[in-house]
Amino acid sequence: MNTARLLLPALLLAACTARVDIRLDESAPAIVIHGYITTDTARHPVTISRSTAYFAVTPPPPVRGATVTISRGHDTFPFVEDDTLPGTYRPVTPIACTPGATYTLAVTVSENGTPATYTASSTAPLDSEIDSIELRPSTVFKNSVEVLGHGTLPDNEKNFLSFHLYRDGLHLTSRLEDLFIVDDSYFKQKEMHGVLCQLLDQETPATTLSPGDVVTLRVDVLPEDYARFLQQARQQARGSNPIFSGPPANISTNITRVSPAADTSPVAGFFAAFPTRKKSAVYAPLP
Amino acid sequence: MKQTPRLLLALLLLLPRALPAGEQRLPVISGIITSSDTGQPLPGANLSVTGTRRGTVANADGHYAITLPRGKHLLLFSHVGHATREVTVDLADDKKLNIALVPRAGKIGEITVTSATSRVARQETGVERLPPRAIKRVPALLGEVDVIKAIQLLPGVQPTSEGSSGFSVRGGSHDQNLILLDDATVYNASHLMGFFSVFNNDAIKDVTLYKGDIPASFGGRLSSLLDIRSREGDASRFSATGGIGLISSRLTVETPIAGERASLLLSGRRTYADIFLAFSGDDDLRGTALYFHDVNARVDYRPGKDDHLYIAAYTGKDRFANKNAGMTFSNRTLAARWDHRFSPRTIAGVTIFTSAYNYYLKSDLGEQLAQDWASGITDTGLKIDIARHATRLTLKAGYNATYHRFHPGEGGGIGDDALFDRVKHPTLLALEHALHAAVEFSPVENLSVKAGARYTLFHDIANGEEITYLRDYLPDHSTRPPRGTLYHTYRHLEPRLGIAYRLDDNSALKASYARAVQHVQVASNSTSGSPLDIWFHATPNVKPQRGDQIAAGYTRALARDVDLSVEVYYRHARDVIDFKDHATLLGNADLEQEIRAGTARAAGIECMIRRDAGRLTGWASYTYARSRRQVREINDGKPYRSPNDKPHAVTIVASLEISPRWNASANWVYATGHPVTYPSGRFLVGETYLPLYPGRNESRFPDYHRLDLSVTRLLSRPGARLKSEINLSLYNAYGRKNPWTIVFRQEEDRPDISYAEQLYLFSVVPSITWNFTF
């Protein structure tokens, strides 16, 4: 239950907001490595950059010239840097992950002439089955369309699912803030029969549907640690309420520095492998 | 150690006879000190014996007792706001002497805490008393006089956030304060998100804050004890007191029943902000419920000169609701006490009490998403106290027990179509009880010693559910002990020691040591505290918090009504809890896995100068204090500032009696901004910028300061049956925008541009209140 929704109106009756100038300390730049591979065969990107001052107006500097590989057992998949996107690395040939298999990312970058190596591993969970999706006007949220899913949850010990939406191929939930992540407690049983997976606000132009639009639901079954990373990142991006939140803390990461051991500068980002499924429906508003 | 409870028990049982025969040769004089206008006992009233440095202080029920040599003595009885009364006695044998002190006529502006001479005479360190008439003159937010807001002006006490009723004592957490109303624990002392406390000043007799030197008869919290006693109704005549303010009104009536042996007091308050919301042009606001109400009731009965029985009850409820969601939370306490005087030397009392705190949330967002959630805590307890006075020696002992029922939560989806399952977290049961004994004596002239101990047992009681034990914060193995069995026990001995040495008539040195153990705490990592706090208790996985505090002080009466006090303290606490990063607390059945334990250290110096009488009264204080925590799994194991670490704090409270009809009051507070964790960098994931943080609590909010003003005009003529006054107040008079919180946001259309935004609750807040009594 969103308790903030209950209490904040009372509080805000009296409250005012104002922008303030705050002088922030600046920490040593962190290396940021983020990437994932899914069951879709593709040239999945891994991005490498450095953090900046919080109020910086320049984009994070990309880390160029890195050596990037993903391996599964004795198989190693080399990556190359994208010519048009500095700091973005893609596998030489398209790759896909297999549910249940473990993948290891290895990154070597040059830091002031000294090689620094980072690594992360992820085991892809078992896959879900999505039979169909259904679009219907919401009876709860004004001027919204509900996207309902039908299918079967996988047999993982714990399931963490995220739901993405596309309209005619356009990714509508590319921002972390728009992600909808749930765990097993959201489902009463293994079978999904018309479970609410996403909402499309029909008062916002970016998500407004027209008759004939093809709406695609993407269901990712996430490793638990990656789901935690996404939830923490989403909360940070949305902003937290001090009544219900503790002190802010760095978002968890599975990226670890192998060498040099003496380097204590921060590391951020995540690497994950997970299965994904898509199902589409054509939007036809009720008469 | 095993002998300790037997020793304490023996002391408790034998106390009425536990005096050497030789000591009984000196007579004791005892009685009750009351106020002549209301007949109310005056807790904390002072008795000093002229020509000696002997004296005593009345207890919470106004009882006093002191042993003196046979012969004539001139006794001085005093209490803040009352004229000092001199009584000559010729003692040959034990004597009972009840004293009624007359309130100072025409004074409408006295805000003193206790009198200067009595503070020098007292042997406790870190103890402050606030009578209701002192609290009444402190300028208040929206004119609503408030006990907790007045407490927050004392040195060593800080609000946990702007406008909050939560408070930190000497750097401790808000849940490390034991708040008692007539011996019943008040688990959430806030109304309206903390803007008001649950204590109605009209129904309060006495407020005592112990910042460290907590008597052995109390325990259960590391930082402080706030002991609040409700008021006895006037047994001599019917009277009424009330006030009408901008957002709330209150009324108290008191009347004799069954002759003058019994009295009844009824007191109630209600806010009416929601009534104004009904006229809003905004549909959403129009249907909003936003109010609190509370009721205090007390019946007193004195069947004879040696017995006093009373039943005191409190019930209060807050409600916020709109058409989509609602929230209710409520406090209830009920206490019944019987005091009996066996002899002038021996007094005993028994209290039976219960208290409950509950909250209920409900959202009504359609059939699939409708949810509710209920949580609470219920206490039932017993308290027995015996005091025996002898020559230069007072023995006190007792037993108290509390049976806790914690209801962590129950709720989820509502109805058959709900998406969310309903869950019910198991009710947790515990029994906390203690034997205590203390002795107060003067081994040599000018030196008084107070030594005591408390032996506490805390039992976890099985309730049929599996008890899961953790290793590295993850489930390790479970057991299922039979329901109702005491499956785990913590035992602790809590020694207490206080020493006071009178250097001369005007100055004294004092020192104290106290160990405290805390078995229950709040699952909240919010620094402000919220009505959704979940209380939980010590288990095999969560050790009780233990703290040792030493304090030393010097008090000097600079003039007849002016005194200076300086006090230093150091506290070291172990197994203090904090929560891991990104902890989930609300609705989490596996709460223990979110907890991390470590150590906490706090130290400080508190300086205070105050004037008790005259046209200008009040106090000024400066506190330098630091508090830090260290938890292995937090902040990479490095020490970090506790959320209430505010090194510098200044408070000035003043009241000026301009004329017998006009009074002006002001208070100014300053404190270093509280610690906070600000980002020190940012990084990009996909299209979203995310913050990077340094260590915990390494930054600070801007410094806090605020000036409050009020002026009171007595409207009624002297001697009139209806007495009334009007109070005008300005809270935050110069409109300082003290941040309640500071958040970091990104521009809507340029997410790469970040900025800081502060939320502040109050600018200048004027109010007007009409108070009356008849």
Image (cartoon, coloured by chain):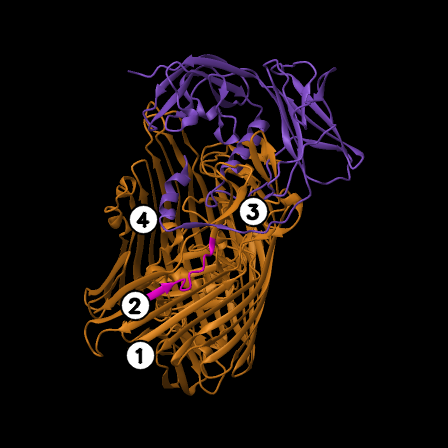
Cα–Cα span, label 2 and label 4: 27 Å
User: Does label 4 or label 3 sit earlier along the sequence?
Assistant: 4
Residue B415 as seen in the image, left or right of residue B613: left
* Chain bearing mark 1: B
User: Does label 4 or label 1 sit earlier along the sequence?
Assistant: 1
| Tag of residue B577 | 3
Amino acid carrying mark 2 in the image: Asn
Instruction: State which mark lies toward you, 2 or 1.
Output: 2
The image quadrant where one finds the C terminus of chain B is bottom left
Secondary structure at numbered mark 3 = strand
Determine whether B383 is above or below B507 in the image: above
Please tell me whether residue B218 belongs to the stretch shown in magenta. Answer: no
Cα–Cα span, label 1 and label 3: 49 Å
Q: Residue at x 45, y 60 (%)?
A: B736
Chain shown in orange? B
Determine whether B413 is above or below B388 in the image: above
Q: Name the residue under label 1.
A: B102
Amino acid carrying mark 3 in the image: Ile
Q: Name the residue under label 2.
A: B727
Neighbours of disc 4 within 10 Å: few (<14), some (14-19), many (20+): many
Query: Quadrant of the rendered structure where residue B422 is?
Result: top left
